Amino acid sequence: MRIGEIAALVGLTTRAVRHYHHVGLLPEPERRPNGYRAYGVRDAVLLARVRRLTELGLGLDEVRDVLADDAGRELAEVLEELDADLARQEAAIRERRYRLGVLLAEPPGVTGPVSPALAALLAQAPRTDSPSAAKDREYLTLVDAAGTGSQEIFALFGTLIADPAVAGLYERLDALAEAPADDPRIAPLAADLMAAVPEELFAAIPEDGVVVTGLKEALLAEYAPAQAEVVGRLMEAFVERGRG
Amino acid sequence: MRIGEIAALVGLTTRAVRHYHHVGLLPEPERRPNGYRAYGVRDAVLLARVRRLTELGLGLDEVRDVLADDAGRELAEVLEELDADLARQEAAIRERRYRLGVLLAEPPGVTGPVSPALAALLAQAPRTDSPSAAKDREYLTLVDAAGTGSQEIFALFGTLIADPAVAGLYERLDALAEAPADDPRIAPLAADLMAAVPEELFAAIPEDGVVVTGLKEALLAEYAPAQAEVVGRLMEAFVERGRG
DNA sequence: AGAAACCTTGCCGTTGCGTCAAGGTCAAGC
DNA sequence: GCTTGACCTTGACGCAACGGCAAGGTTTCT
């Protein structure tokens, strides 16, 4: 048989057969005078075995091992390991499908998949177009996605945001967008902000204050100088009173 | 944030983040004076979205599509397609696991996994060390693996092999191993062989006689000249009386 | 001052082949 | 005898999503 014939016989492509030669899975057969590979029945039997094994999901090197010492013991060993691996894959797929199902069942329109706690918070928050409030929501989304914040934090934050006085604070912070870093409104705003934060929220902040080193600066970089001054003081308060 | 910080924050490796830049999933951020990438909160939010989507099993280009037109409709579309794909994968894995289970439950020692019909045939065949009989078994194994032979053939072949007279025929064929191609024993052996084959077996051979063009010659190549002569005549008989 | 722990770009390796590219071979029809 | 068309040959790149290493530069801690 030539390569195309044996490939068709065992249900492979010629490319696959050559590949098996290349990786040493199957020895190169004799050649005809014209250079064509000349296959025999034994090659076909071997190839058929290879095909069955690869269809089961074995890698080519595992197939080689199994074929090499055809004790049958090695085979069972490999197969059990493979089964365990497949079981893991199956579980992973089911997990993904489950989460997919949750996503698909959800009402559309949300920015992205968020935890229920954050979803409640966002729904509860008053409609506002304050840029500062938007930054806060962005930050909360991030903390939610990072998974480092507890549900507790979102609940506490929710009560804070629901406070009608907070809208005014956001407005005052927005008003500092063009102000210099030594604007006199900074200190009183920072004080009012700290006063508005409930004590439990301070306590709920995790030990290292911010989620990761560097996030604090990244956060401040989003604000104009005067605003950064305010937010920076607030963050310091969180660090100091959080667990310090 | 530097790249390591944002990576830790969203639960990725720095290598993955750079990879996302490379493939255009995420725009390259500003650089610090020292050349380090400088990430902001928005990058982190984006990366977190990417992570969730890839964890669901989306490819990077699909993630890019979803992120691009964040209509939310496209997302549902992609997700449903993905779910269907995952369902297929799950079914495939289950199928493999099922066959694995069958293999593992089987008594060890068999040459390889074979169809039940062939297994019955091999178990039924008398113990012999005739090389010709071994070749026949090899051929049957091949036909079985190729899946082109029907169960019917194996049953018919089984009755043939069970015939006590066949052992003698194999012996006579083996005896021709060193004989020249014009040995006088050839014609009578071929005749006796054809006489031994039940009519139904002739009829059961598929239309093209052999499974694939080229297999016939490969088969003959396995035999010594005198043996090939005998087997060749037998095969011709199969071709002629099969469906011709 | 030196080590540890970051960062930079860039390129190779992974898996199991698919897909050209650039030919040589062979049987058949004109 | 010449052209198709269907085979075959070796060789090398492509793929998905990064991991790992090389060979440097930066920052920070000690």
Image: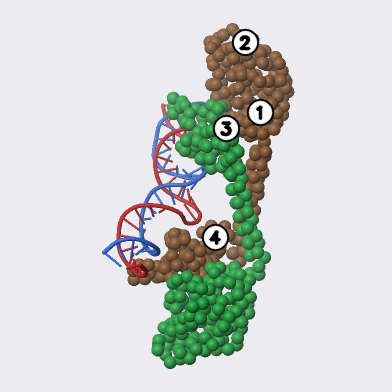
Chain colours: A green, B brown, C blue, D red
Residue located beneath label 2 in the image: B187
What residue appears at the point 65 percent right and 38 percent down from the top-left corner?
B103
In the image: residue A218, left or right of residue B48: left
What chain is tagged by disc 1? B
Tell us which disc is closer to us: 4 or 2.
4
What chain is tagged by disc 2? B
Looking at the rendered structure, which numbered label has been put on residue B207?
1
What is the crowding at mark 4: few (fewer than 14 residues within 10 Å), some, or many (at least 20)? some
Q: How far apart are marks 1 and 2 (CA)?
A: 26 Å
Location of residue B145 in the rendering, given as x and y in whole percent from the top left corner:
62, 33
Q: Amino acid type of disc 4? A: Thr
Q: Amino acid type of disc 3? A: Ala
Q: Amino acid type of disc 1? A: Glu
Q: Distance between the residues labelled 1 and 4?
A: 51 Å
What chain is tagged by disc 3? A
Q: How far apart are marks 3 and 2 (CA)?
A: 42 Å
Q: Amino acid type of disc 2? A: Ala
Which of pointers 4 and 2 lies earlier in the amino acid sequence? 4
Residues under numbered marks 3 and 2 in contact, where contact means CB atoms less than 8 Å apart:
no
Q: In which quarter of the image is the C terminus of chain B?
A: top right
Residue located beneath label 3 in the image: A71
Residue located beneath label 4 in the image: B54
